[in-house]
Image (spheres, rainbow, N blue to C red):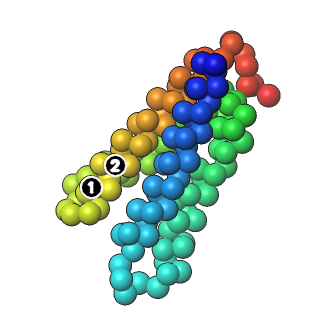
Amino acid sequence: MRENNVLLHLRLSYVLFLVFLVISLLLLNPANAPISVAIFWIVVKVVPLLLFAPAVWLKKSYGLLALTLVVLVYMGFATMHCFAKGLEQVLAFVELGLATWLILTCSKAVKSQPRGHGAV
């Protein structure tokens, strides 16, 4: 039962982080900018994270560890946006919270596996 709970939290945090990135990019898109600009930024920010979907769904240790390193890069950019004003600042703080939750659930999922699991 505990194993399923860890996997559920892992998948939930991953999906919520992806959905939040898409929504925040759409909210921050200037009104006069074409939608193609927003789609470009969604592709640039979301596609690298989608590459880790098999690791999240299959709970592969090395893939989850690599995902935590990629999320740290996202956290660095979110930290820079924390110094902005208004909605961008609020969304940056929420992104930091969701990224932290994703990193913690990845670490917990890796720790719950027996040694050497997920190497293939």
Mark count:
2
Q: Amino acid at mark 2?
A: Val
Q: Quadrant of the N terminus?
A: top right
Q: Amino acid at mark 1?
A: Val
Q: Is residue 69 visible?
A: no
- Number of residues whose C-alpha sits closer than 10 Å to that of mark 1, classed few (under 14), some (14–19) or many (20 or more): some
Measuring from the top left, give residue 102's x and y in whole percent. 49, 37
Residue in the foreground of this view, choosing between 77 and 64: 64
Residue in the foreground of this view, choosing between 80 and 109: 109
The residue drawn where x is 50% and y is 68% is: 41
The residue drawn where x is 56% and y is 48% is: 15
Secondary structure beneath label 1: helix
Q: Is residue 91 visible?
A: yes
| Residue occupied by mark 1 | 90
- The disc at residue 94 is 2
The residue drawn where x is 54% and y is 33% is: 9
Left or right position of 93 against 83 = right
